[in-house]
Protein backbone atom coordinates (compact mmCIF):
# COMPACT_ATOMS: atom_id res chain seq x y z
CA UNK A 1 0.00 0.00 0.00
CA UNK A 2 1.16 3.53 -0.76
CA UNK A 3 0.78 6.15 1.98
CA UNK A 4 0.66 9.89 1.32
CA UNK A 5 0.59 12.90 3.59
CA UNK A 6 -2.80 14.62 3.57
CA UNK A 7 -1.68 18.15 2.75
CA UNK A 8 -0.51 20.24 5.68
CA UNK A 9 -2.37 18.14 8.23
CA UNK A 10 0.68 15.87 8.47
CA UNK A 11 -1.56 12.79 8.60
CA UNK A 12 -0.26 9.80 6.62
CA UNK A 13 -3.19 8.18 4.85
CA UNK A 14 -3.40 5.17 2.57
CA UNK A 15 -3.78 5.95 -1.13
CA UNK A 16 -6.87 3.69 -1.13
CA UNK A 17 -9.62 4.87 1.19
CA UNK A 18 -12.74 3.02 2.31
CA UNK A 19 -15.92 4.68 1.01
CA UNK A 20 -18.94 3.65 3.05
CA UNK A 21 -21.62 4.26 0.43
CA UNK A 22 -21.90 0.85 -1.24
CA UNK A 23 -22.74 -1.60 1.53
CA UNK A 24 -25.19 -4.35 0.70
CA UNK A 25 -27.98 -3.27 3.02
CA UNK A 26 -29.68 -6.64 2.67
CA UNK A 27 -26.90 -8.09 4.83
CA UNK A 28 -26.65 -7.78 8.61
CA UNK A 29 -24.72 -4.69 9.72
CA UNK A 30 -22.14 -6.84 11.55
CA UNK A 31 -21.29 -8.60 8.27
CA UNK A 32 -20.79 -5.26 6.51
CA UNK A 33 -18.66 -4.04 9.42
CA UNK A 34 -16.29 -6.94 8.74
CA UNK A 35 -15.40 -5.26 5.44
CA UNK A 36 -13.87 -2.33 7.33
CA UNK A 37 -11.85 -4.68 9.51
CA UNK A 38 -10.67 -6.58 6.44
CA UNK A 39 -9.69 -3.32 4.69
CA UNK A 40 -7.81 -2.20 7.80
CA UNK A 41 -5.86 -5.48 7.83
CA UNK A 42 -4.94 -4.80 4.18
CA UNK A 43 -3.40 -1.45 5.15
CA UNK A 44 -6.31 0.91 4.43
CA UNK A 45 -6.31 3.46 7.24
CA UNK A 46 -8.86 6.09 6.18
CA UNK A 47 -12.62 5.49 6.27
CA UNK A 48 -15.28 7.79 4.84
CA UNK A 49 -18.99 7.86 5.57
CA UNK A 50 -21.94 10.26 5.81
CA UNK A 51 -25.40 10.42 7.33
CA UNK A 52 -28.01 8.65 5.16
CA UNK A 53 -25.53 6.60 3.14
CA UNK A 54 -26.90 3.09 2.49
CA UNK A 55 -30.39 3.68 3.79
CA UNK A 56 -28.84 5.44 6.77
CA UNK A 57 -26.98 2.32 7.91
CA UNK A 58 -23.45 3.38 7.00
CA UNK A 59 -22.55 5.40 10.11
CA UNK A 60 -23.84 2.59 12.35
CA UNK A 61 -21.89 -0.03 10.39
CA UNK A 62 -18.80 2.12 10.85
CA UNK A 63 -19.57 2.37 14.58
CA UNK A 64 -19.56 -1.43 14.92
CA UNK A 65 -16.14 -1.73 13.24
CA UNK A 66 -14.50 1.38 14.71
CA UNK A 67 -15.37 0.24 18.23
CA UNK A 68 -13.35 -2.91 17.58
CA UNK A 69 -10.47 -0.84 16.20
CA UNK A 70 -10.53 1.61 19.13
CA UNK A 71 -7.34 0.33 20.74
CA UNK A 72 -5.37 1.46 17.68
CA UNK A 73 -7.14 4.83 17.42
CA UNK A 74 -3.93 6.68 16.53
CA UNK A 75 -3.43 4.46 13.46
CA UNK A 76 -6.57 5.25 11.43
CA UNK A 77 -8.74 8.18 10.38
CA UNK A 78 -12.46 8.62 9.97
CA UNK A 79 -14.26 11.17 7.80
CA UNK A 80 -17.89 12.31 8.06
CA UNK A 81 -20.03 15.04 6.54
CA UNK A 82 -22.79 17.62 6.95
CA UNK A 83 -24.64 19.64 4.30
CA UNK A 84 -24.70 23.45 4.56
CA UNK A 85 -28.45 23.81 4.00
CA UNK A 86 -29.30 21.19 6.62
CA UNK A 87 -26.93 22.85 9.11
CA UNK A 88 -27.71 26.49 8.53
CA UNK A 89 -26.86 27.57 12.09
CA UNK A 90 -23.70 26.89 14.04
CA UNK A 91 -25.74 25.11 16.76
CA UNK A 92 -27.24 22.77 14.18
CA UNK A 93 -23.79 22.07 12.74
CA UNK A 94 -22.51 21.18 16.20
CA UNK A 95 -25.53 18.96 16.89
CA UNK A 96 -24.90 17.07 13.61
CA UNK A 97 -21.29 16.47 14.58
CA UNK A 98 -22.40 15.15 17.98
CA UNK A 99 -24.91 12.78 16.38
CA UNK A 100 -22.26 11.44 14.02
CA UNK A 101 -19.78 10.97 16.87
CA UNK A 102 -22.37 8.94 18.77
CA UNK A 103 -23.15 6.74 15.79
CA UNK A 104 -19.50 6.23 14.86
CA UNK A 105 -18.62 5.47 18.49
CA UNK A 106 -15.57 7.74 18.43
CA UNK A 107 -14.55 10.85 20.40
CA UNK A 108 -13.30 12.73 17.39
CA UNK A 109 -13.86 12.88 13.62
CA UNK A 110 -10.54 13.40 11.85
CA UNK A 111 -11.86 15.00 8.65
CA UNK A 112 -15.28 16.68 8.60
CA UNK A 113 -16.67 17.72 5.22
CA UNK A 114 -18.83 20.66 4.32
CA UNK A 115 -20.80 18.30 2.16
CA UNK A 116 -22.13 18.27 -1.35
CA UNK A 117 -21.29 21.79 -2.46
CA UNK A 118 -22.80 21.74 -5.95
CA UNK A 119 -23.40 25.47 -6.27
CA UNK A 120 -21.45 28.47 -5.05
CA UNK A 121 -24.60 29.33 -3.04
CA UNK A 122 -24.07 26.20 -0.92
CA UNK A 123 -20.59 27.37 -0.02
CA UNK A 124 -21.91 30.86 0.79
CA UNK A 125 -24.57 29.31 3.05
CA UNK A 126 -21.88 27.37 4.92
CA UNK A 127 -19.73 30.45 5.39
CA UNK A 128 -22.38 32.98 6.43
CA UNK A 129 -21.99 34.47 9.94
CA UNK A 130 -23.46 32.11 12.55
CA UNK A 131 -23.57 29.29 9.98
CA UNK A 132 -22.13 25.81 9.57
CA UNK A 133 -18.50 26.86 9.24
CA UNK A 134 -18.61 28.75 12.55
CA UNK A 135 -20.13 25.71 14.23
CA UNK A 136 -17.36 23.51 12.81
CA UNK A 137 -14.67 25.92 14.02
CA UNK A 138 -16.21 25.59 17.48
CA UNK A 139 -16.15 21.79 17.18
CA UNK A 140 -12.51 21.96 16.15
CA UNK A 141 -11.61 24.10 19.17
CA UNK A 142 -13.40 21.62 21.41
CA UNK A 143 -11.51 18.70 19.86
CA UNK A 144 -14.62 17.07 18.33
CA UNK A 145 -13.15 17.30 14.83
CA UNK A 146 -9.60 17.70 13.64
CA UNK A 147 -9.87 19.19 10.15
CA UNK A 148 -12.58 21.04 8.21
CA UNK A 149 -12.62 20.00 4.57
CA UNK A 150 -14.80 20.50 1.50
CA UNK A 151 -16.77 17.95 -0.50
CA UNK A 152 -17.81 19.33 -3.85
CA UNK A 153 -19.16 18.62 -7.31
CA UNK A 154 -18.27 22.03 -8.74
CA UNK A 155 -16.13 22.64 -11.81
CA UNK A 156 -12.36 22.85 -11.42
CA UNK A 157 -12.16 26.66 -11.65
CA UNK A 158 -14.81 27.11 -8.94
CA UNK A 159 -13.11 24.61 -6.66
CA UNK A 160 -9.93 26.54 -7.21
CA UNK A 161 -11.63 29.79 -6.18
CA UNK A 162 -12.94 28.30 -2.93
CA UNK A 163 -9.61 26.76 -2.02
CA UNK A 164 -7.89 30.09 -2.45
CA UNK A 165 -10.07 31.44 0.37
CA UNK A 166 -7.94 29.15 2.58
CA UNK A 167 -10.80 28.22 4.92
CA UNK A 168 -10.58 24.45 4.45
CA UNK A 169 -7.69 22.00 4.63
CA UNK A 170 -8.57 19.62 1.85
CA UNK A 171 -11.09 18.77 -0.82
CA UNK A 172 -13.08 15.71 -1.85
CA UNK A 173 -14.26 15.67 -5.45
CA UNK A 174 -15.58 13.25 -8.04
CA UNK A 175 -12.62 12.81 -10.30
CA UNK A 176 -11.76 9.85 -12.46
CA UNK A 177 -10.13 8.75 -15.68
CA UNK A 178 -13.16 9.89 -17.72
CA UNK A 179 -13.86 13.32 -16.27
CA UNK A 180 -10.46 14.51 -15.06
CA UNK A 181 -10.12 17.39 -17.55
CA UNK A 182 -13.32 18.88 -16.03
CA UNK A 183 -11.93 19.14 -12.47
CA UNK A 184 -8.17 19.05 -12.93
CA UNK A 185 -7.71 22.75 -12.19
CA UNK A 186 -9.11 22.14 -8.70
CA UNK A 187 -6.67 19.27 -8.13
CA UNK A 188 -3.72 21.36 -9.18
CA UNK A 189 -4.72 24.33 -7.02
CA UNK A 190 -5.15 22.10 -3.97
CA UNK A 191 -1.80 20.49 -4.58
CA UNK A 192 -0.09 23.84 -5.04
CA UNK A 193 -1.60 25.26 -1.84
CA UNK A 194 -0.58 22.19 0.14
CA UNK A 195 -4.08 20.78 0.67
CA UNK A 196 -5.13 17.16 0.65
CA UNK A 197 -7.05 15.91 -2.40
CA UNK A 198 -9.50 13.05 -1.98
CA UNK A 199 -11.05 11.47 -5.06
CA UNK A 200 -14.46 9.82 -5.02
CA UNK A 201 -16.27 7.87 -7.68
CA UNK A 202 -13.13 6.48 -9.40
CA UNK A 203 -15.24 4.11 -11.54
CA UNK A 204 -17.72 6.77 -12.60
CA UNK A 205 -20.71 5.25 -10.82
CA UNK A 206 -20.05 1.74 -12.18
CA UNK A 207 -20.04 2.99 -15.74
CA UNK A 208 -16.48 1.91 -16.47
CA UNK A 209 -16.96 -1.75 -15.46
CA UNK A 210 -20.22 -1.79 -17.47
CA UNK A 211 -18.66 -0.51 -20.69
CA UNK A 212 -15.27 -2.16 -20.66
CA UNK A 213 -15.42 -3.02 -24.36
CA UNK A 214 -16.17 0.53 -25.49
CA UNK A 215 -13.69 2.02 -23.03
CA UNK A 216 -10.82 -0.24 -23.95
CA UNK A 217 -8.73 2.77 -24.94
CA UNK A 218 -8.39 3.65 -21.24
CA UNK A 219 -6.33 0.58 -20.45
CA UNK A 220 -2.63 -0.04 -20.75
CA UNK A 221 -1.14 -3.43 -21.49
CA UNK A 222 -2.39 -6.35 -19.43
CA UNK A 223 -5.06 -4.47 -17.56
CA UNK A 224 -8.78 -3.95 -17.89
CA UNK A 225 -10.35 -0.48 -18.19
CA UNK A 226 -11.64 -0.91 -14.61
CA UNK A 227 -8.13 -1.64 -13.35
CA UNK A 228 -6.78 1.29 -15.35
CA UNK A 229 -9.40 3.61 -13.82
CA UNK A 230 -8.43 2.54 -10.30
CA UNK A 231 -4.75 2.88 -11.12
CA UNK A 232 -5.35 6.34 -12.60
CA UNK A 233 -6.62 7.81 -9.31
CA UNK A 234 -4.66 5.70 -6.85
CA UNK A 235 -1.28 6.22 -8.47
CA UNK A 236 -1.78 9.92 -9.28
CA UNK A 237 0.75 11.86 -7.15
CA UNK A 238 -1.57 14.87 -6.88
CA UNK A 239 -4.41 12.76 -5.43
CA UNK A 240 -3.82 11.95 -1.77
CA UNK A 241 -6.49 9.30 -1.31
CA UNK A 242 -9.07 7.62 -3.54
CA UNK A 243 -12.28 6.53 -1.85
CA UNK A 244 -13.76 3.38 -3.28
CA UNK A 245 -17.22 2.21 -2.28
CA UNK A 246 -16.74 -1.43 -1.26
CA UNK A 247 -19.45 -4.07 -1.23
CA UNK A 248 -17.29 -7.20 -1.08
CA UNK A 249 -13.80 -8.26 -0.04
CA UNK A 250 -13.06 -8.83 -3.72
CA UNK A 251 -13.58 -5.10 -4.39
CA UNK A 252 -11.11 -4.31 -1.62
CA UNK A 253 -8.59 -6.77 -3.10
CA UNK A 254 -8.90 -5.16 -6.53
CA UNK A 255 -8.24 -1.64 -5.21
CA UNK A 256 -5.41 -2.95 -3.04
CA UNK A 257 -3.82 -4.61 -6.10
CA UNK A 258 -4.08 -1.32 -8.04
CA UNK A 259 -2.19 0.39 -5.22
CA UNK A 260 0.44 -2.35 -5.26
CA UNK A 261 0.94 -1.95 -9.03
CA UNK A 262 0.88 1.80 -8.68
CA UNK A 263 2.37 2.94 -11.95
CA UNK A 264 1.29 6.53 -12.52
CA UNK A 265 0.02 7.62 -15.93
CA UNK A 266 2.78 9.49 -17.72
CA UNK A 267 2.18 12.95 -19.27
CA UNK A 268 2.09 11.19 -22.67
CA UNK A 269 -0.57 8.77 -21.36
CA UNK A 270 -2.63 11.71 -20.14
CA UNK A 271 -2.38 13.46 -23.48
CA UNK A 272 -3.48 10.27 -25.24
CA UNK A 273 -6.47 10.00 -22.91
CA UNK A 274 -7.44 13.63 -23.30
CA UNK A 275 -7.48 13.14 -27.05
CA UNK A 276 -9.89 10.27 -26.74
CA UNK A 277 -12.10 11.96 -24.22
CA UNK A 278 -14.27 13.99 -26.49
CA UNK A 279 -16.34 16.73 -24.92
CA UNK A 280 -19.20 14.28 -24.73
CA UNK A 281 -17.22 12.05 -22.41
CA UNK A 282 -17.19 14.82 -19.81
CA UNK A 283 -20.92 14.81 -19.94
CA UNK A 284 -21.73 11.43 -18.52
CA UNK A 285 -24.28 10.90 -15.79
CA UNK A 286 -22.67 9.24 -12.79
CA UNK A 287 -25.96 7.95 -11.41
CA UNK A 288 -25.49 9.84 -8.12
CA UNK A 289 -29.24 10.58 -7.92
CA UNK A 290 -29.03 14.13 -6.56
CA UNK A 291 -31.36 15.33 -9.32
CA UNK A 292 -34.25 13.15 -8.17
CA UNK A 293 -35.18 14.85 -4.93
CA UNK A 294 -36.86 17.95 -6.28
CA UNK A 295 -38.49 16.73 -9.47
CA UNK A 296 -42.17 17.71 -9.11
CA UNK A 297 -43.06 15.15 -11.77
CA UNK A 298 -41.20 12.22 -10.14
CA UNK A 299 -39.39 11.41 -13.36
CA UNK A 300 -36.66 8.77 -12.85
CA UNK A 301 -34.13 11.23 -14.25
CA UNK A 302 -30.97 9.30 -13.44
CA UNK A 303 -32.32 6.14 -15.10
CA UNK A 304 -32.98 8.16 -18.27
CA UNK A 305 -29.58 9.86 -18.09
CA UNK A 306 -27.73 6.59 -17.54
CA UNK A 307 -29.43 5.33 -20.66
CA UNK A 308 -28.28 8.44 -22.51
CA UNK A 309 -24.71 7.62 -21.42
CA UNK A 310 -24.82 4.70 -23.80
CA UNK A 311 -25.30 7.06 -26.71
CA UNK A 312 -22.27 9.06 -25.65
CA UNK A 313 -20.00 6.13 -24.91
CA UNK A 314 -20.93 3.75 -27.68
CA UNK A 315 -21.70 6.61 -30.10
CA UNK A 316 -25.00 5.02 -31.03
CA UNK A 317 -27.27 6.53 -33.64
CA UNK A 318 -30.76 7.68 -32.64
CA UNK A 319 -32.16 4.73 -34.53
CA UNK A 320 -30.13 2.27 -32.44
CA UNK A 321 -31.08 4.07 -29.24
CA UNK A 322 -34.78 3.80 -30.14
CA UNK A 323 -34.44 0.09 -30.82
CA UNK A 324 -32.53 -0.57 -27.61
CA UNK A 325 -34.93 1.61 -25.63
CA UNK A 326 -37.68 -0.94 -25.91
CA UNK A 327 -35.75 -3.19 -23.52
CA UNK A 328 -35.22 -0.41 -20.99
CA UNK A 329 -38.84 0.72 -21.11
CA UNK A 330 -40.39 -2.68 -20.68
CA UNK A 331 -37.82 -4.76 -18.82
CA UNK A 332 -35.02 -2.51 -17.66
CA UNK A 333 -34.52 0.32 -15.19
CA UNK A 334 -37.33 2.39 -16.71
CA UNK A 335 -39.97 -0.31 -16.47
CA UNK A 336 -41.31 0.89 -13.11
CA UNK A 337 -41.35 4.58 -13.97
CA UNK A 338 -44.16 6.65 -12.47
CA UNK A 339 -43.65 9.39 -15.03
CA UNK A 340 -41.97 9.53 -18.42
CA UNK A 341 -39.53 11.93 -20.04
CA UNK A 342 -42.48 13.60 -21.75
CA UNK A 343 -43.86 14.73 -18.37
CA UNK A 344 -40.96 17.12 -17.86
CA UNK A 345 -42.25 20.68 -17.26
CA UNK A 346 -38.77 22.16 -17.72
CA UNK A 347 -38.83 23.64 -14.20
CA UNK A 348 -35.03 23.35 -14.05
CA UNK A 349 -34.76 21.90 -10.49
CA UNK A 350 -32.82 18.87 -11.67
CA UNK A 351 -30.27 20.91 -13.63
CA UNK A 352 -29.67 23.05 -10.53
CA UNK A 353 -29.02 19.93 -8.49
CA UNK A 354 -27.03 17.97 -11.05
CA UNK A 355 -23.50 17.21 -9.85
CA UNK A 356 -22.29 16.97 -13.46
CA UNK A 357 -24.14 20.09 -14.68
CA UNK A 358 -25.83 18.15 -17.47
CA UNK A 359 -28.38 19.59 -19.88
CA UNK A 360 -31.03 17.23 -18.55
CA UNK A 361 -34.04 19.04 -20.03
CA UNK A 362 -32.66 18.87 -23.56
CA UNK A 363 -31.77 15.19 -23.18
CA UNK A 364 -35.17 14.33 -21.76
CA UNK A 365 -36.85 16.07 -24.68
CA UNK A 366 -34.82 13.94 -27.07
CA UNK A 367 -35.57 10.78 -25.11
CA UNK A 368 -39.29 11.60 -25.02
CA UNK A 369 -39.15 11.41 -28.83
CA UNK A 370 -37.29 8.09 -28.73
CA UNK A 371 -39.77 6.76 -26.22
CA UNK A 372 -42.73 7.71 -28.36
CA UNK A 373 -41.14 6.06 -31.37
CA UNK A 374 -40.17 2.91 -29.42
CA UNK A 375 -43.77 2.53 -28.23
CA UNK A 376 -45.13 3.13 -31.71
CA UNK A 377 -42.90 0.37 -33.10
CA UNK A 378 -43.81 -2.02 -30.29
CA UNK A 379 -47.55 -1.58 -30.57
CA UNK A 380 -47.56 -1.51 -34.35
CA UNK A 381 -45.95 -4.96 -34.26
S1 LIG B 1 -36.84 19.99 -15.36
FE1 LIG B 1 -38.17 18.24 -15.74
S2 LIG B 1 -37.04 16.48 -15.02
FE2 LIG B 1 -36.06 18.29 -14.18
S3 LIG B 1 -36.98 18.52 -12.15
FE3 LIG B 1 -38.18 19.77 -13.55
S4 LIG B 1 -39.84 18.43 -14.26
FE4 LIG B 1 -38.28 17.12 -13.30
S1 LIG C 1 -28.35 13.57 -13.93
FE1 LIG C 1 -26.74 14.58 -12.71
S2 LIG C 1 -27.52 14.58 -10.59
FE2 LIG C 1 -28.76 13.15 -11.77
S3 LIG C 1 -27.86 11.15 -11.44
FE3 LIG C 1 -26.92 11.99 -13.30
S4 LIG C 1 -25.08 13.06 -12.66
FE4 LIG C 1 -26.30 12.72 -10.80
Image: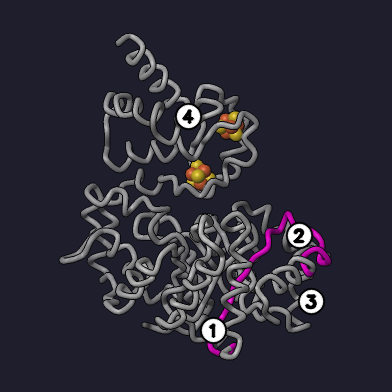
**Residue farthest to the left?**
221
For label 1, the crowd category at 10 Å Cα-Cα, with few meaning under 14, some 14 to 19 and many 20 or more, is many
Q: Earlier in the sequence, mark 3 or mark 2?
A: 2
For label 3, the crowd category at 10 Å Cα-Cα, with few meaning under 14, some 14 to 19 and many 20 or more, is some
Residue at 52% from the left image edge and 55% from the top image edge: 26
Residue 80 included in the magenta stretch of the image? yes
Please give left or right for residue 240 compared with residue 150 in the image: left
Label 1, label 2: how many angstroms apart (C-alpha)? 27 Å
Residue at 62% from the left image edge and 66% from the top image edge: 59
Q: Earlier in the sequence, mark 1 or mark 2?
A: 1
Q: Earlier in the sequence, mark 4 or mark 3?
A: 3
In which image quadrant can residue 71 be found? bottom right
- Local secondary structure at mark 4: helix
Task: Name the mark on residue 138.
Answer: 3
Q: Is mark 4 within 8 Å of ligand 1?
A: yes
Q: Earlier in the sequence, mark 1 or mark 3?
A: 1
- Local secondary structure at mark 2: loop
Mark 1 lies on residue: 76
Q: Earlier in the sequence, mark 2 or mark 4?
A: 2
Image vertical order of residue 351 relative to residue 4, above or below: above
Label 1, label 4: how many angstroms apart (C-alpha)? 45 Å
Label 2, label 4: how many angstroms apart (C-alpha)? 33 Å
For label 2, the crowd category at 10 Å Cα-Cα, with few meaning under 14, some 14 to 19 and many 20 or more, is many
Task: Name the mark on residue 364.
Answer: 4
Please give left or right for residue 220 compared with residue 260 in the image: left
Amino acid sequence: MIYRTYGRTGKKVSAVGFGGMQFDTGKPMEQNAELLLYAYEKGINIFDTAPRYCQDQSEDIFGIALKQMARQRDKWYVCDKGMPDENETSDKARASVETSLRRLKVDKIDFYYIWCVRKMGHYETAMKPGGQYEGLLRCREEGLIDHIVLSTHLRGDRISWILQEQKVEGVLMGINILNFPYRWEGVETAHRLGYGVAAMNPLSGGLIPRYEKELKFLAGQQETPTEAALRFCISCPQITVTFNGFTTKKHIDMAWAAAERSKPFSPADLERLKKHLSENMNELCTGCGYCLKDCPQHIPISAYMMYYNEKLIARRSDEKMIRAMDDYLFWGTLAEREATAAHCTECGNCEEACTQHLNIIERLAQMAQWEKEAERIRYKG
